[in-house]
Amino acid sequence: MLVNKDSMLLMVSNYKISIIVPVFNAEKFIDVCINSVISQTYSNLELILVNDGSSDDTLNLLLDYKNLYNNITVINKINEGPGIARNVGLDIASGDFVMFLDADDYLLDSCCENVIEYIKNSDADFVCYGAKFFSSGKKTISGFSYTYKEIKGFDILANYLAKGEIKSVAWNKIYRKSTIDKHTIRFPVNRINEDAMFVMTVSLYAKFIKLVPGVFYFHTSCNSSSFSNNISIKHFSASIDVLNAEKILLCNEGIYESLQVHYKTHSAKLLFYLVILGALNLNRYVDFLNCLNVIYKSDAWIKLDQSSVFELPVEISLRVLLCRQKRFCWIIAKTMRNIGVTLQ
């Protein structure tokens, strides 16, 4: 538990966790996020709040918490996006382990106590745990959880690309900071889908990870500036750029050929996700068609389209081929939205 300056620590641990939170215009919901860290049953924490150029009263709220708690650090910077804000946090983090928390999300109060037990006395480079998704009205949308599993070596990156148990989000994991420091791993400067490159790079260098039971993270849709709430051509283009950057990384490491089928499966899933996300959230059919053209002109689509469907799981191949039926995809998505289906 983060403690008041006039209080004593209730629990002592040799292992310190740094929790990094990029914050932008979050005055309406940052209290829930911060209080979920203050309420942790694990004591040896530092909370690094990076104010990313907020124009509302966010900074003053963060400073109020800093004045109350010894283990809170507040950094104020110009707006450059969550990736760079997290990098600033990483640069000063003093913990043995690192976690990332979004400003509109919150943790189960036993999250840190539970996840550190899986990583502290092992060689795991990171540990993944379950999450639930909530709408702004606190209605449960979806979620995921794991049964205990250990993954080693080449299988880690293959899992990230093809199987997808290792999610491309930074926030449902606890990372060994020495692994991040050893390979100087940082978030890219792009503001959209920056998590994916970070998680893929950590997966590339990781030698051993764990998927562990328990739902400890709660993801909400409070932030109007989040990716899923702001779909446009630039979001499609940025996601394609991430796919290209992932391929370049694999090529530079000399492992693309051995992971080519996994990468194509990964590309297929992301492209399908973008199509459905666009169809669900764009109000004009012409905007949807313009976004689809971004996909169809991309190298990821062209290489995927030219490959045999037998190089991919049949289910994924059929989903990608469904993109050809633009009007059908649009109608199905609008029907889903009308009955209250959302996509995370």
Image: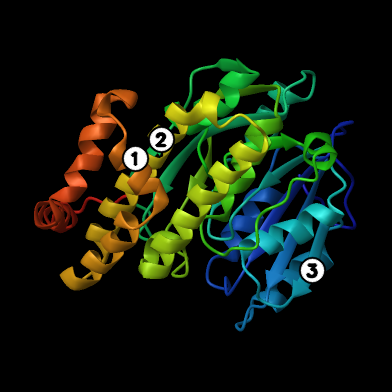
> Which residue is labeled 1 in the image?
304
> Which residue is labeled 3 in the image?
75
Image quarter for residue 212? Answer: top right
Task: Pick the quarter of the image with the N terminus.
Answer: top right
Tell me the distance, in whole angstroms, between the alpha carbons under discs 2 and 1: 6 Å
Q: Position of residue 303 (x, y in %)?
A: 37, 42
For label 3, the SS is strand
Is label 1 in contact with label 3 (beta carbons under 8 Å)? no
Image quarter for residue 127? Answer: top right
Tell me the distance, in whole angstroms, between the alpha carbons under discs 1 and 3: 43 Å
Q: Position of residue 159 (x, y in %)?
A: 51, 26
Q: Position of residue 48 (x, y in %)?
A: 77, 57
Which dot, 3 or 2, sits closer to the camera? Answer: 2
Tell me the distance, in whole angstroms, between the alpha carbons under discs 3 and 2: 40 Å
Horizontal placement of 220 versus 20: left or right?
left
Labels in figure, total: 3
| 304 in relation to 290, above or below | above
Q: Position of residue 268 (x, y in %)?
A: 35, 40
Dot 3 surroundings within 10 Å: few (below 14), some, or many (20 or more)? some
| 331 in relation to 167, above or below | below
The residue sitting at 61% across, 20% down in the picture is 154
For label 1, the SS is helix
For label 2, the SS is helix
Q: Earlier in the sequence, mark 2 or mark 1?
A: 2
How was this image coloured?
Answer: rainbow
Label 2 is placed on what type of residue? Answer: Lys
Image quarter for residue 41? Answer: top right
| Residue 32 or residue 93, whichever sits in front | 93
Label 3 is placed on what type of residue? Answer: Ile
Is label 2 in contact with label 1 (beta carbons under 8 Å)? yes
